[in-house]
Image (cartoon, helix red, strand yellow):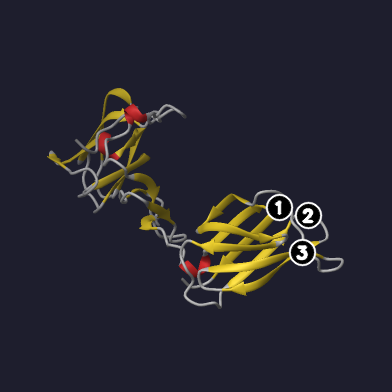
Amino acid sequence: MSNYLTGLAQLNPQVKRHNGGTATLTLDENGTTNATMLYVNGVAQTPGIDFNVSGTTLTCTSTLPAGTNIATTIQYFNTGIVNTVADDSIGLAQMASGVDGNLISYDASGNPAHVATGSAGQVLTSAGAGAPPTFATASSTSADEKLQAWCHIDASGTISLADSFNVTSVTDHGTGDHTVTWDTDFASVNYAFVGTAGASQRFVMAATIATGSVRFYVMLSSNGALSDTDDISIIASGDQ
């Protein structure tokens, strides 16, 4: 069903006779095209094709034949107040059913549109103004953008790993002298190695870098003497 009228005040049909020789007729009530009938010499005219109504003015697409009482108009409704949906009155129950996983958006013309359901693991990606968003596979982080290994070491007593990634073990060779062994070897010895010693006046220096491990010293800043501490952090990054 289409082109039906809602929210219009019903009239006792208003019948009016009109003289011809014009393309414009005046109605007694404000009306609408679909609520008005027009007969010319007894022949019904088609609303929206042969004539249109705006307010109290009926405009024909061509001039009516000359003559007295050539045309007859019948008004069934006046414009009244068109029904409007109250704010906050539309809930899920009032919405049309759709496809599971689709999202509601707006197209470049401002009309409601849907975003097709993506696949598991995809993310919603904006294409900017004028284009609907789409689901796309999230870009992955390359190996060069990640830390390949790290650990936090407590060497104040018996040396131990507090936490780590890609580290097999840590070895204590004596005061301030330790080796970290990687779980996955690096492709060469040209990887980056950085260490910090949390206690003040100490620093970490690489002694021997191998593809599968790194031996390092924890030293006092004041005189370079080897020293133990409970807070050593090691990170390494490079090709594996």
The amino acid type of the residue labelled 3 equals Leu
Q: At numbered mark 1, what does the secondary structure look like: helix, strand or loop?
A: loop
Q: x and y percent of residue 225 in the render? A: 81, 66
Q: Is residue 168 above or below residue 45?
A: below
Q: Which of the 4 quarters of the picture holds residue 38?
A: top left
Q: Residue furthest right?
A: 222
The residue identified by callout 3 is: 226
Q: x and y percent of residue 99 in the render? A: 26, 42
Cα separation between marks 2 and 1:
7 Å
Rendered-image quadrant of the N terminus: top left
Residue sitting nearer the eye, 74 or 98: 98
Q: Which of the 4 quarters of the picture holds residue 101?
A: top left
* Marked residue nearer the N-terminal end (3 or 1): 3
Cα separation between marks 3 and 2:
13 Å
Q: Is residue 73 visible?
A: yes
Residue sitting nearer the eye, 135 or 41: 135
